[in-house]
Image (tube, grey):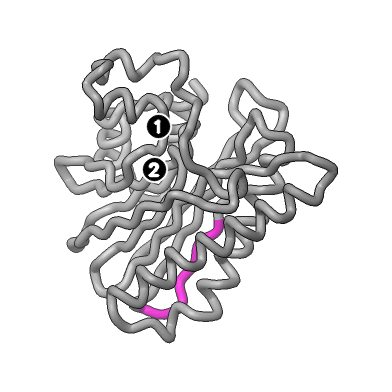
Amino acid sequence: KMKITAKTDVGCVYEDNQDFYVAGRLSDDSYWVVLCDGMGGVADGGRASRMAGEFLKTEIELRLLDLITPETIKGFMLDAVKRCNLKVHSEGATSEGAMMGTTVVMAIVRSNVVYVVHAGDSRAYHIQKRSIKQITRDHSIVQELLDAGKITPEQATNHPNKNIITSAVGIEDEIRIDVNEQKLSRGDMLLICSDGLSNMLSNDELLAIAKDNDFYKTADLMVERAVE
């Protein structure tokens, strides 16, 4: 059985917290998490993240237990995020010109495999006793520069365009979504987070906190360290 712990914090920069998460268990073999980070430079980021998270929660609770094969699970996840995008985009188009946008990471665990779909720069990591691996790949200007070899990983850490993402829920009626899957072993950990955490802590710091502390303390400790 999996255990879930979570923490969110407004941080030190903004007056409102635009992150939103929901998670749950539908059976001993079906667990899920949705995390959304509203886009701070867009007027209704907080409303977009909550709307997207609640929409996907409803979809998961209605349909997940009926999905049997990996192909149907991944197909459902991609379709749900596409429809979520249209809903948020439509809402933004009718709300007095206030654009609405949010990142999304949606993860479903079934039979020792995690399936992840995402848009934006919120992340999913796979943590084992001695290693941490990023499952997702950021949809961002900085990631594109890294992939093209135009900047180094060190330059990416403090790049001035670090906050510019290239895909998000609600901005356009079409959306780029990536899907990944990762096998899990007993004792492994999944970390789903917004850039409020990943911008502040290195992979080594995240791994050290996960490895050296009781599970139920990890979310609190990671967020406390990021705020510091």
The residue under label 1 is: 198
Name the residue located 73 percent from the left edge and 35 percent from the top edge: 43
User: Who comes first in sequence, dot 1 or dot 2?
Assistant: 2
Depicted 78 relative to depicted 177: above or below: below
Name the residue located 34 percent from the left edge and 67 percent from the top edge: 109
Asked if the residues shown at circle 1 and circle 2 are in contact, with their CB atoms under 8 angstroms apart, the answer is: yes
Depicted 74 relative to depicted 105: above or below: below
The residue under label 2 is: 123
Image side of residue 108 versus residue 147, left or right: right
User: Residue 201 versus residue 71: which sits nearer the camera?
Assistant: 71
Query: Quadrant of the image for the N terminus?
Result: bottom left
User: Residue 21 versus residue 102: which sits nearer the camera?
Assistant: 102
Name the residue furthest left.
Answer: 130
From the top left corner, tell me how far across and down residue 192 is, in percent. Answer: 41, 48
Could you tell me the amino acid type at mark 1? Answer: Ser
Could you tell me the amino acid type at mark 2? Answer: Arg
Residue 24 in magenta stretch: yes
